[in-house]
Amino acid sequence: MSRRAQAGLAVLFANLVWSTTYPVSQLALSIGAGRLAALRFLISGVIALPLLWGQSLPRGRMLLAAVGLGLLGFSVAFLLQIEGIRLAGASLAAISIALEPLATVIVARLWLKEPLPRLAPVGFLVATVGTWLLAGAPRPGHDANLPGILLLVAAAACFGFYNVFSKPVTEQVGELPLTVIGALAAGVAFLPWLWFGPPVVSMPRADVLWAVYLAVGPTLLGYFLWFYAVRRAEVGFAALFLYVQPVVGALLSWLWLGQGLTPLEIVGGVAVLAAVYLGVRPERVIERT
């Protein structure tokens, strides 16, 4: 199996696991976004720490880069995402996060000089319209989930930067050390949230178990597979698989949470998915057609 095929399988499974983040986070939000984040990343870091035994660990600038990536992709982006989920609902969150691949491809073009598909500007326009529809077509005197949608868009931008910058850092640090260092950095950043509210031992057992799942599945397994993929293929290729998340995430939200979508929101979701496709479609595919 070629390195590109290995990367494709790895990133496909990563996105399938990440898709469960939306409904699971919705189920566990009763303990608060910050506390959920603290539990998720601290648990993942502590569980995986023994795996670093015998590994070549980064130092100096590369250690700072690994910590910085963890703070950006795990702390800032996650908090924006979880607050957006709380305000907008898991179904809308799953679809609006489809903007992440578009942001990833744009940053990859600017930073890594990867080719940018010529239809990317059209993708931006369609994504803007789709996001507006997903927000409920906000206008004066019309109620909509605009704050939640804006937070989700900001989270997608943070994830886009994180996805691109993870490639050169992974090549220097390695998949496992980068995953564990990032999780520990995020867990420490969210520690203050554990000091407010009731103690962890009094939290609902189900919420703690969901946090453990988020630590093992979407964090450790998901990000390890992503780093494995971008180390073996270009970021733009890996970004093609990111829109698996909104499709599976919306389906899981319907099955687990009973959340539906209005016709207007469905149109917006289709527009966003179309924008992502236009934005990340490889140039060579466009030329063949």
Image (cartoon, rainbow, N blue to C red):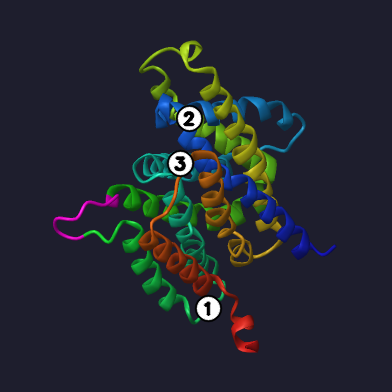
Of pointers 2 and 3, the one earlier in the residue sequence: 2
Q: Are marks 2 and 3 in contact (CB under 8 Å)?
A: no
Q: Answer left or right for 83 relative to 186.
A: left
Under mark 2, the amino acid is: Ala
**Which marked residue is nearer to the observer: mark 2 or mark 3?**
2
Please name the residue shown 54% across and 30% down the image: 40
**Which disc number belongs to residue 28?**
2
Residue 65 point in image, percent of width and height: 53, 45
**SS of the residue under disc 3:** helix
Residue 281 point in image, percent of width and height: 57, 74
Q: Is residue 137 above or below residue 171?
A: below
Residue 80 point in image, percent of width and height: 39, 43
Please name the residue shown 46% across and 49% down the image: 91
> What residue occupies the far left of the structure in this picture?
141
> Could you say which is closer to the camera, residue 144 or residue 34?
144
Q: Is residue 58 visible?
A: no
Q: Is residue 76 magenta?
A: no
Q: Is residue 140 magenta?
A: yes
Q: Answer left or right for 70 relative to 12.
A: left
Q: Is residue 153 above or below residue 110?
A: above
Q: Answer left or right for 238 relative to 51.
A: left
Q: Which residue lies under the disc numbered 3?
A: 78
**SS of the residue under disc 1:** loop
Please name the residue shown 34% across and 52% down the image: 149
> Could you say which is closer to the camera, residue 262 or residue 141?
262
Q: Which residues are magenta?
A: 139-146
Marks 2/3: CA–CA distance: 14 Å
Under mark 1, the amino acid is: Pro
Marks 1/3: CA–CA distance: 28 Å
